[in-house]
Image (cartoon, rainbow, N blue to C red):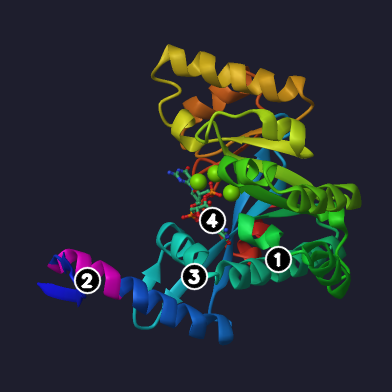
Amino acid sequence: KVKLEGGSMIATLSKSDHSKLSRKVQIEKRLLEALNHRDLHVMFLPQQDVKTGAITSVEALVRWEDSVLGTVSPEELIPIAEETGLINEIGQFMLEKSCEQAAIWAQKGMPIKVSFNSSIREFRDKNMVKTIRKVLEKYKCSPELIQIEFTEKFALEAEAEKAIVQQIQKLQQDGIVFVLDDFGTGYASLRYLQMLPIGKLKIDKSFINSVTKQEKLEKLVQGLVQFGQSLDLQVVAEGVESAEQFALLKRVGCDAVQGYYISPPISAEEVEKML
Ligand code: C2E
Ligand code: MG
Ligand code: MG
Ligand code: MG
């Protein structure tokens, strides 16, 4: 047991609390180094158009293989990065990598869009529009090739922050598509769809998981697809793992799918082979 004593306050940490804490501290420290040495890398999750079968876009996902800590998953990494502010650095890295790769594919004549995940803090930075435009220019990447995903949690906070909304509007006018990720799992406010220029909805994989096993879920997913489309949004299902799920999503008119049934996250070279 570790004891922290501060004045009259005494807190005890169990052994497992302590090891969690020290892993967190280690992750922070190593992450800073990884960012400095550009040790992070990116994998791409293909997204398939349901009607045509074409791979029309990929989602860039951060990957970190640390020599000391081993593989650190985004689920572990992102919350710590958000807490420490290092999420801005990860965001910058993903922005650069996404624009660079989208431009390379465009030059090779491959019409494929790249989307990446973003967090609220990144748009609190008043220079976000400038930063993104500069990176697009650096790689000669057309804004139409880039999509930015965020979750409902992000959008809800944005509601309170006008400056964030304005930056997103400007970037949308440039041609960047904004994607509402993990749709259906957030805080049940639909006002963000009114506030923000969203172009695409991603139905969370927790709905897709058992969609072929529960009639209620099937109806729910069908409803979400119709809801999105009635607002002129492109609707994507994530976490599609089986032929049955794919067939069901096709039947209810979902626009695009991603998931292990199509492909796991792969390298840029593997994406090219898939096209
Ligand atoms: P997400 O944006 O919803 O990304 C999809 C996640 O589902 C990815 O996990 C992907 O590998 C996984 N996945 C793909 N197909 C399937 C499937 O068929 N079944 C299941 N069960 N999972 C599937 P990953 O890469 O571990 O990322 C987890 C989350 O971490 C992402 O969820 C995203 O919210 C966040 N994330 C990842 N990279 C970044 C990043 O660069 N920046 C930020 N801010 N967040 C990131
Ligand atoms: Mg995403
Ligand atoms: Mg998602
Ligand atoms: Mg998710």
Mark with earlier residue (2, 3): 2
Mark 3 lies on residue: 84
Badge 4 local density, few (<14 within 10 Å), some, or many (20+)? many
The residue type indicated by label 2 comes to Ser
Residue drawn 85% across and 75% down? 138
Callout 1 amino acid: Leu
Query: Which tag is nearer the camera, tag 2 or tag 4?
Result: 2
Query: Residue 175, how many percent across, how many down?
Result: 87, 49
Q: CA distance from mark 2 to mark 3?
A: 19 Å
Is label 4's Cβ within 8 Å of ligand 1? yes
**Amino acid carrying mark 3 in the image:** Thr
Q: Residue at x 81, y 71 (%)?
A: 135
Residue 188 position in % (x across, y down): 55, 28
Q: Secondary structure at mark 2?
A: helix
> What secondary structure is found at the residue carrying circle 1?
helix
Mark in the foreground, 4 or 3: 3
**Residue position marked by numbered label 1 in the rendering:** 95
229 and 167: which one is in front?
167
Q: Is residue 156 above or below residue 10?
A: above
- At mark 3, the secondary structure is helix
Task: From the image, give the main secondary structure of the stretch colored magenta.
Answer: helix
- Dot 4 corresponds to which residue? 265
Q: Which residues are magenta?
A: 15-22
